[in-house]
Amino acid sequence: MKQFLLFLAITITSGQLLAQHPPTDWYHKDAGSSEYQGIGTDKVYKELLKDRASSTVIVAVIDSGVDHEHEDLATNMWVNPGEIPDNGIDDDKNGYIDDIHGWNFLGGKDGRSVNDETLEVARLYKKYNYKYKNADPSKLSKDQKKEYELYLKVKKTLENGRESAEKNIKRMEESKGSVINGIKAVADALGDKPITKENVMALETDDTAAAFGKNVLSRNLEDTDSFESADSLVAMISEQFQGGFDYYNGQLDFNYNPDFESRGIVGDNYDDPYEKGYGNNDYEGPDALHGTHVAGIIGAIRNNDVGMDGVATNVQIMTIRAVPNGDERDKDVANAIRYAVDNGASVINMSFGKGFSWNKQVVDEAVHYARENDVLLVHAAGNDGLSNDTSHENKAGNFPNDKYEKGFGFWFWKKKECDTWIEVGALSHKTGDESVASFSNYGSQNVDIFAPGQEIYSTLPDNEYRYLQGTSMASPVVAGVAALLRSYFPTLKAKQVKEIIMNSSDKLMMDVKLPGDGEKMVPFKSLSVSGGTINVYKAVQLAMKTKGKKKIKKKSTGA
C-alpha cells in the first residue's frame, strides 16, 4: 500500500489546522553546517563532483504512476529507445506495446486502470474464509493448521481494520463539528472585524466554543491570512476534513472489503503468477500523486529555478505502475521488477509495502533476478511506528523484503537474503531526540539506514508541488544517492553501492524518542543495521577510494 501518512493538514486533537513547514530544500542541506539533518546534496555537487564526468543512470519508480509531462520531470523521463510512440506495435519485442516511458501493470487493454483496491488481508480472508470459518482445529492436518492460524490472524486484522475506520469517521465528524462551531463563534465575537491572526489573538471571550476556535486559529493562521467571513474559512476546513472522510470510507468500501473485486479491469489470469504482457501504457493512471512525488525526490531537474531539485543528476526516471489505492499484488510487483531490470534500470525504488503476502516466492524470484543483474533495490520500511524485527498482531511481516522464503529456488542455500537491497527508515526534519520521524518503522536487523522522510517538498501532477511525509519519501532520497553514485562511479557494483551508503552514514551517538512511543528513549544506533543516517558527501568520498568491478548482465528467465 502507498506508504505515505495521510495528511489532512489537520491534527485534530491538538487543534492544529495548517502545517508549519521547514525550508523546501532542508533535506539537501549539510548536517554539519545547518540546523537540519540533511544529506549534503548541494555541497557534494559544489565541492566533490563539479569537475567529474557522469554517465546516465536509469532509476525505475515502481509506484502509483508518474506525471511524465511535469515541468520538473519531463526531460528526465526515461524514453525507450527501441519503441516507436503510438504505433500500436511492440517494436522492441519486449512483450509491451508502446512502452515509451514504462508500463502500467494495473491497466486493461480497454484503457481503464485500477485505482481503488483491497488490502492483501481482505484477499486472504476471502481465500480462506469458506474453508475455515466453521473448521474444527482438532481435525486439521499440520499444513491445514498452519493455514488456519493465518486465517485467524487475517480475520482479526480485517475486523480490527474495519472497526478502526468506523471509529475514525465518527471521531472526525465530532472534531469537524467542534472546529466549525469554534470558527463561527470567533466570527460572531469579532463582529465586523475580519478573521486575521491579529484580531483573533486580541479577542477576549468567556464563550467555550469561541475560546476553542481562538486556540485553533491563533496557532495556525499566518500573519497574512485574512478571512472576511466564517463561511470561506469553514469551506477550506471542510475540504481538508473531506480528505480524511474519503480515506476512511475508502477503507470500508474497498481496502477492508473482501467482496470488492477490481481485477476484472486488468483482464489477466490472476491464478498464473508468471503471466506477462498484461497491462497498458497509461503511465500516470487515475492518481499519480504518490509516484510523482517520489520521482521528483530522485530526479527533479536540478538548478533550473523551477519547483525543487532532485537528489540525482544525469538520471532517467522509468515509471512502472503497480501500486493502487490499496495493497499491491505480488504478481504485479514481480513483473515490475523484471521489467525494470530487462529495460536497463540500475536502481529500483519501491515506496510501498504491506503486512501480508499472497505469493512471496514469485517476488523473491524477481528480487533475486535483480540481484543477479547487478540492480540495487531500495525499499521503504513502513509507517506503522513498529519494529520490523518482530511480529505484530495486525501483520504477518513487512512485504516485500530482502529475506528469501525457505525453500525458494536452488540458490536459497547459498543466500538467505538479497545483499543488493536497502531498507529505509524516515528521519524527521527536527534534530536531537526528535531526529527520527514518529511514524517510521525501525529495526536493528531489518532496517538498514535512515534518510529524510518528514515534510519533504516535491513534485505533484499538473506542475504542482507539496510537502508529504513517510518512509515513502525517505526511500527515494536513498535511491537518488544510489543513482548519483552509479552515475559518477559507473564501475561500482550494486553491492558496493549499498556498502558505501551504509559505511559512510552519519552515526548519531545519542538517544532518540522511539517511533510509535514518544515516551521511550532508545539509542539511535539500535534502530537500524548501520546505526546511521545517509550522507551523500561522505558516500562520494568513500566511493572515490573504492575500486569498482566489471558488470555482467544476465538474461531474464521465468516471469
Image (tube, rainbow, N blue to C red):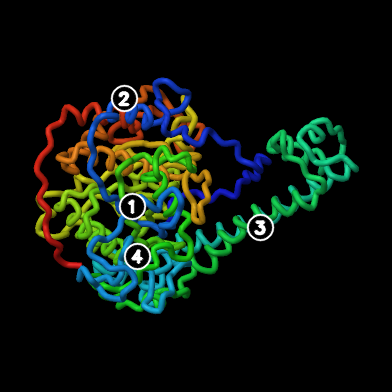
Q: Which mark is residue 170?
A: 3
Mark 3 or 4: in front is 4
Label 1 is placed on what type of residue? Ile
Q: Quadrant of the N terminus?
A: bottom left
Residues under labels 1 and 4: Cα distance? 22 Å
Secondary structure under the numbered disc 3 in the rendered image: helix
User: Foreground: 189 or 176?
Assistant: 189
Q: CA distance from mark 2 to mark 4?
A: 44 Å
* N-term-proximal mark, 1 vs 2: 2
**Residue 290, quarter of picture:** bottom left
Rounded to the nearest whole Å, what is the CA distance between mark 2 and mark 3?
A: 54 Å
Residue corresponding to mark 2: 47
Q: Residue 48 in the image: x percent, y percent?
A: 28, 26
The residue indicated by pointer 1 is 317
Q: Nearer the viewer, mark 1 or mark 3?
A: 1
Q: CA distance from mark 1 to mark 2?
A: 26 Å
Left or right of 400? Residue 168 is: right
Residue located 29% across and 66% down the image: 331
For marks 3 and 4 on the same chain, the one whose residue lies earlier in the sequence:
3
Compared with 532, 69 (above or below) is below
> Where is mark 4, residue-wise?
329
Q: Nearer the viewer, mark 2 or mark 3?
A: 2
